[in-house]
Amino acid sequence: MIQLLKTGVVVEANKEFTYIMTCDCEFFNLRTKNNKPPHIGEMFTGELYVKGKVFYKLIFLAVISSLVIYGLINTIYKNTVAYSVVVDINSSIQFKVNKSNEVLKVMPLSVKGADLTKDLNLKNKTLDIALTMLLEKSHKLKYLDNFYSKKDNPIHLYMTAHNNTLIPLTAFKHKADELKITLQINDNGELSNLYK
């Protein structure tokens, strides 16, 4: 254990601690040696005196600081856009998504896109769930018609800047298969197979 020794003029003393003033005009509580207090005005060297409560206050402060830092990092992580996805289903809609694959922002890029997303609460849903909900509503509003059920006319997903991480789209792909719709996923300009 490191002992912090300080030297200074005794200002106050008792059997438990001695209060000194150093040559730099700093005041410290030091442990009294052998329960024998020095006289006021004498030079005294001793180990810093710390009460038990101070130790617990420091631990409490460290725990609170850690929780605040964790909260800030988590908030920044959850609210930072990691990549964008544009869906082309007879209308265009852009999603801004975080690293947890949660939708942060939905931006219709056309009038039909605005109609399609109007009553859907897609924010804070996973991208997979949001795309599935969008596909279901498109089918319900008959935006898909016979045009997208042909193999030559797939629904396009354009994804950008997600650093080649696996993005789960199982529910979306399952719904597209159920509706007999072909998907074409374009990842930064290349057709991709990085999706479950």
Image: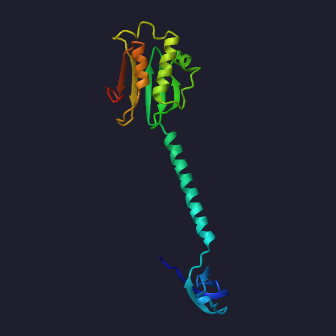
Q: Nearer the viewer, residue 68 or 163?
A: 68
User: Is residue 109 at all visible to an observer of this figure?
Assistant: no
Query: Quadrant location of the C terminus?
Result: top left
Going 60% across and 66% down the picture, which residue do you hit? 56
Q: How is the image coloured?
A: rainbow
Residue 135 % position (x, y) = 47, 18
Q: Is residue 130 left or right of residue 153?
A: right
Residue 179 % position (x, y) = 42, 13
Above or below, 61 relative to 169:
below
Q: Quadrant of residue 27?
A: bottom right
Q: Nearer the viewer, residue 35 or 99?
A: 35
Going 46% across and 14% down the picture, which residue do you hit? 90
Residue situated furthest top in the rendering: 146
Q: Quadrant of residue 33?
A: bottom right
Above or below, 183 relative to 168:
above
Residue 72 % position (x, y) = 54, 48
Residue 58 % position (x, y) = 58, 65
* Numbered label tally: 0
Q: Is residue 28 left or right of residue 188?
A: right
Going 37% across and 15% down the picture, which residue do you hit? 182
Above or below, 137 relative to 42:
above
User: Is residue 122 at all visible to an observer of this figure?
Assistant: yes
Q: Nearer the viewer, residue 191 or 179?
A: 179
